[in-house]
Amino acid sequence: MFCAKCGKELPDGATFCPSCGAAVQTGTGDAHTSGIDALTRDHNAQEYWVERLIALIIDYVIVYVVLGIATAIVAIPALLTGGAAFFGVVFGGFALLWGVIFVFYNAVMEVSSGASIGKKLFKLKVASRRGSNPTFAEAFVRNLSKIYWLLLLLDVIVGLAISHGYQQKYSDHYMGTKVVHA
């Protein structure tokens, strides 16, 4: 069988295309109604989201280790001079700044190469409606929820609830982007 949307060959028993995420029409009228439905029934959807989660964790580790080292270099002199209260205020500001930097890291990586380092390790890439790398605006908006983990979780849940495939967070749906296997 081949996907009716993108034409890629489908593995046996697939309910969604692993390339584009389109629901496979079986002729029995049992196509999934949402991405959440796919996630509860389709092994491919579950593997896909595990890969995306691990890729996200890898990206967090890469970016936050670098930022942690930079913050330590700035904070150690303040702590040594008795500025613990100052450090607390500055560190709170750093948390927001780190989130913004993480959003920009993802956006720049997706515009330049189609994927962050974590996504590249799993051979995933972000595709726009045009099939190319996203523009900076598309990449920035689709990553904006990564500024804080709760926003990201809501972005994923809402996206899966309104989508007929399983490859889009709400921000992907809004921007017309999708994370696909490269």
Image (cartoon, rainbow, N blue to C red):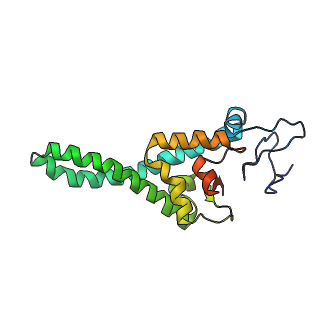
- What x and y, as percent, mark residue 110? 54, 61
Q: Point out the residue furthest to the right here.
A: 27
Image point 72% across, 53% down: which residue?
20
Q: Relative to 179, does residue 45 appear above or below in the rendering? A: above
Looking at the image, residue 134 sits to the left or right of residue 20; the answer is left
Image point 68% across, 61% down: which residue?
129
- What x and y, as percent, mark residue 67? 33, 53
Compare residues 99 and 161 and report the one nearer the observer.
161
Number of callouts: 0
Q: Point out the residue furthest to the left here.
A: 81
Looking at the image, residue 82 sits to the left or right of residue 42; the answer is left
- What x and y, as percent, mark residue 97? 34, 53
- What x and y, as percent, mark residue 74? 21, 55
Location of the C terminus by quadrant is bottom right
Looking at the image, residue 39 sits to the left or right of residue 116; the answer is right
Looking at the image, residue 172 sits to the left or right of residue 118; the answer is right
Is residue 52 in view from this perspective?
yes
Q: In which quadrant of the rendered view does residue 181 lie?
A: bottom right
Compare residues 105 and 57 and report the one nearer the observer.
105
Image point 23% across, 49% down: which residue?
90
Image point 75% across, 38% down: which residue?
33
Is residue 123 in view from this perspective?
no
Q: Relative to 54, does residue 62 appear above or below in the rendering? A: below
